[in-house]
Image (tube, rainbow, N blue to C red):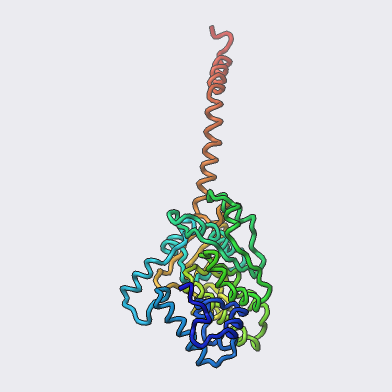
Amino acid sequence: MEDLRLDQLPGVGPVTTKKLSDAGIHSIMDLIVRGPVELAEISGMDKDTAANIVEKARQALVEGGMLAKDFVSATEIYKRRQEIGRITTGTECFDLLFDGGVETQALTEVYGEFGSGKTQFCHTMCVTVQKPKEEGGLEGTVLYIDSENTFRPERIVSIAKAHGMDPEKVLDKIIVARAYNSAHQTLILEEASQMIQENNIKLLVVDSAVGLFRSEYLGRGTLSERQQRLNKFVHLLVRIAETYNCAALATNQVMASPDVFFGDPTRPIGGNVVAHTSTYRIYFKKSGKKRIARMVDSPHHPEQEVIFGLGEAGVIDPDSETKKKTTKATKSKVEPEVKEEPKTDSVDVDTKIEDIPEDSE
């Protein structure tokens, strides 16, 4: 299947191949990801011809067993889902929430206010995805699209050490792309296909997915264009995850809804475009020193909440730090008592002797 080049498809000649290659489409897998509409825009061919070429590419992938057939039984779908990878979060609480870990071939959206732990969760996943499969990882590489300049390699180092992993090796397997505007962010994703195949990328992080679109398209007059471009981006993100069997993890910002008078007014940015595209939606919120993660939307998970914390290991179980403090406190109490026991005995004896009156005899 890897030997099937673009120019071997009917209707794709050297000129079209060159145009597609310049646009980041290097294989028939890329054709499936980008779709017929974008193919027509890039190559200049009419939409019917583009749709026919994409269909030929899809058929070739189906014959090679890389894509599912048009009509399959529920049993076959069930068997295919058993092969989906799950990335451990390194915590019992989140693994319980995700029923084993963050899934491949799906888009997981995490939204919440500033400081709720979204970026820390992304950093943690960058480490855990590199763990051996027997430890819940996928032994894969990470592509991190950073639109807010919040990626911190030193944080990766501390998390890797806490998980007992070599920090240098972990950093070497994280590819970071800094996005400076929404068009650049989309371009990075469009050109990611070849990198994903060559580097065994199993986790694609976008932090944040909507931030640049939100800052560039202001006012109701630009809302329609913003949603169209955002729609293209998130759908491309999903197609990449499904086609290359990797997990897509995106963070999202929030706003306070003015028409909510009771309950939590916090709402994620992006509207229905993002809501309908995300496979899983997780809401992070702060509650004192602790944080709460709630499964808001999922095809099969129940709507539930878990409590988590932040520590040296990234996201942690709520009782992790408590156990450490308790252990340290217990040691500090026990050690002085053991050392002071002989002294206490001698003091008691002296006290008893001094309490005896001199004329008592």
Q: Which residue is at the front of the view, 273 or 30?
A: 30
Give residue 189's position: percent from left, percent from top.
59, 74
Image point (57%, 59%), residue name: 173
State whether residue 342 appears in this view.
yes
Above or below 279: residue 307: above
State whether residue 110 appears in this view.
no
Give residue 152's position: percent from left, percent from top.
64, 59
Image point (57%, 50%), residue name: 166
Q: Which residue is at the front of the view, 29 or 327?
A: 29
Q: Is residue 66 left or right of residue 49?
A: left
Image point (65%, 64%), residue name: 150
Above or below 52: residue 329: above
Give residue 346's position: percent from left, percent from top.
55, 19
Number of numbered labels in the structure image: 0
**What is the quadrant of residue 175 in the picture?**
bottom right
Q: Quadrant of the N terminus?
A: bottom left
Q: Which residue is at the front of the view, 18 or 160?
A: 18
Of all residues, the one furthest to the top in this rendering is 361
Q: Is residue 134 left or right of residue 345?
A: left
Give residue 308's position: percent from left, percent from top.
51, 58
**What is the quadrant of residue 14 in the picture?**
bottom right
Above or below 237: residue 360: above
Image point (56%, 22%), residue name: 343
